[in-house]
Every structure is written in structure tokens, then in C-alpha cells.
Amino acid sequence: MTSSSRRLPHPVLLGPSAALLLLAAAGCSSGGAASVAVPSPSPEAAAYCRALDKELPDTVAGLERKDPDPGSELTAGWGDGAIVLRCGVPRPAEMDDDQSKGITADGVNWMLEQREDDGPRLTTTLRKAYVEVTFSSAYAHDTTPLAALAPAVKKTVPNRL
């Protein structure tokens, strides 16, 4: 979860070919997999989220953990943004809809939202902090990665009583 910022030499000091190569490499480098908004939860929820961050797996669905920018204990990601988790998000208004869809993965309940032109977004229900997971379109019909996240959620984010 460390992020590093590297200072690139000023391109004027390099020859034209080296400057172009350096700029191309900087554009292709992957400092952070994706960019996401960091939630602003209550202090209680933030404590659950920090505990969750420490328990999250290194791989999900065969994808290595690569946290999004900006770095935060409230966000995590796997596979260059293919799977992104945000903890401490506000309660989604869609949870008030009697027609909203839900699924259970290894004892954790999730509300399912199908997003246009992208994969699903799932948010935990009945927990003291809301955990949101978004999937890229590659996972449009595959929510099995939730099984890899469920043990950490169960261990660190208690049920609402």
C-alpha cells in the first residue's frame, strides 16, 4: 500500500529520442491500477474498514492486488481495476427498493446493481460498514470473486443487530 512518486528528469536535458522514450514509459507505467473516490465514513466504520484492509487477500480470481489511486486503507483493487473494493461507502438508496436484487456469498449478503456498459456493483447489507465491490465488464455475469472477499468481511465488519 505504499505509493511512490518518481521525479522524471526534465525532457529538455535529454536528447529528443530519449525524451520521447521517457514520456512513453511514464504514460505506460502503472503506478496505480485505477482511480477511485475514497469514502468518508464515520470513525466507527473507518475502524472496521482499516481492519478489513489488513485481512484482504493478495489475489482475487487469479488477479494480483493492485490498489487504486489515491492510496487509502478504505480502498483496494485487483488486476488493474478489474475488481475494486471501497469500504465505508454511504448506504445506497437502491437498498430502499423492494425490487432490488441480492445475493449471498459465503455468508455475506450483497445488494446487486447492474451498471450500464460495465460490470456489476455489489454492496454489503446488514453490516456495520457498507463495503462496495465493483467489477469490470469481464465479470458482468460472474460474482464468484466475492467468495474470496467474504472471509475478510465476515471477520472484520460485524453484522448489524
Image (spheres, helix red, strand yellow):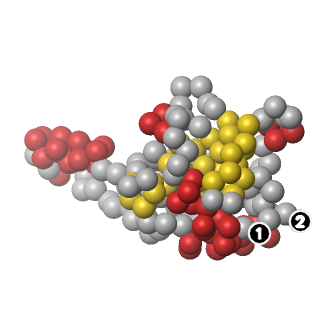
Residue 74 visible in rendering: no
Picture disc at residue 161: 2
Q: What residue lies at 72% left-to-right and 72% top-to-bottom?
A: 47
Left or right for 65, reference 159: left
Mark 1, other Cα within 10 Å: few <14 / some 14–19 / many ≥20: few
Judging by the rendered image, the residue that carries numbered circle 1 is 158
Left or right for 111, reference 5: right
Mark 2, other Cα within 10 Å: few <14 / some 14–19 / many ≥20: few
Identify whether 74 is placed above or below 61.
below
Q: Secondary structure at mark 1?
A: loop
Give 99 or 23, whichever is nearer the viewer.
99
Q: What residue lies at 10% left-to-right and 41% top-to-bottom?
A: 17
Q: CA distance from mark 1 to mark 2?
A: 9 Å
Q: Amino acid at mark 1?
A: Pro
Q: What residue lies at 65% left-to-right and 65% top-to-bottom?
A: 153
Could you say where residue 9 lies in the image, as x and y percent from the top left? Answer: 24, 56
Left or right for 43, reference 70: right
Give 36 or 124, whichever is nearer the viewer.
124
